[in-house]
């Protein structure tokens, strides 16, 4: 295999990793924020809430898997990535919970 092929593979892996990092941390938070915005405008915001719950569920499960299958001594990056993902999704779930009890 040529060097160019290996470079393309590592570039693709880096793009996937960066995409996962951004989406795992911010997806639930963004959709929870959009739910609050929709509620402020007088709408129910149920569509944004469902998208938020899907993101929280998917990325929360992946973050939990990273956290449980790695340790800070051997796979520190994945361990702390799992913790950060769980904290961000917990915050998104809290924001979503508050959005449903917000009065218009």
Image (cartoon, grey):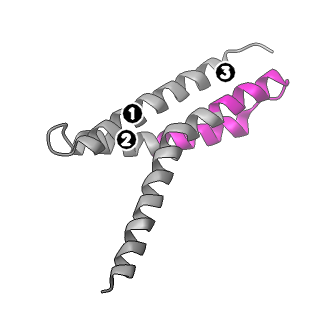
> Horizontal and vertical percent for residue 39?
77, 24
Quadrant of residue 82 in the image?
A: top left
> Horizontal and vertical percent for residue 81?
35, 40
Q: Residue 18: which disc? A: none
Quadrant of residue 27 in the image?
A: top right
Camera-side mark, 1 or 2 = 1
Tag 1 secondary structure: helix
Determine contact: label 1, label 2, CB under 8 Å: yes
Tag 3 secondary structure: helix
N-term-proximal mark, 1 vs 2? 2
| Residue appearing at x 63%, y 31% in the figure | 32
Label 2, residues with CA under 10 Å away: few <14, some 14-19, many ≥20: many
Q: Residue 63: which disc? A: 2
Specify the principal SS of the magenta part.
Answer: helix
Q: Label 1 to label 2, Cα distance in Å? A: 8 Å
N-term-proximal mark, 3 vs 1? 1
Question: Of 14 and 86, which appears nearest the observer?
Answer: 14
Q: The C terminus is located in which quarter?
A: top right
Give the magenta-colored segment's residue range. Answer: 32-58
Looking at this view, name the residue that lies furthest to the top: 103
Label 3, residues with CA under 10 Å away: few <14, some 14-19, many ≥20: many
Q: Residue 84: which disc? A: 1
| Residue appearing at x 50%, y 25% in the figure | 91
Residue carrying label 3: 99
For residue 84, above or below residue 20:
above
Tag 2 secondary structure: helix
């Amino acid at each position: 295999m040529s060097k160019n092929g290996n470079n393309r593979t590592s570039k693709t892996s880096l793009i996937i990793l960066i995409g996962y990092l951004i989406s795992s941390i911010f997806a639930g938070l963004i959709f929870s924020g959009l739910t609050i915005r929709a509620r402020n405008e007088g709408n129910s915001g149920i569509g944004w809430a469902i998208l938020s719950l899907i993101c929280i569920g998917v990325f929360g499960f992946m973050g939990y898997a990273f956290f449980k299958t790695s340790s800070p001594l051997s796979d520190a990056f994945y361990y702390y990535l799992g913790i950060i993902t769980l904290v961000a999704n917990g915050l998104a779930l809290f924001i979503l919970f508050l959005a449903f009890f917000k009065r218009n």
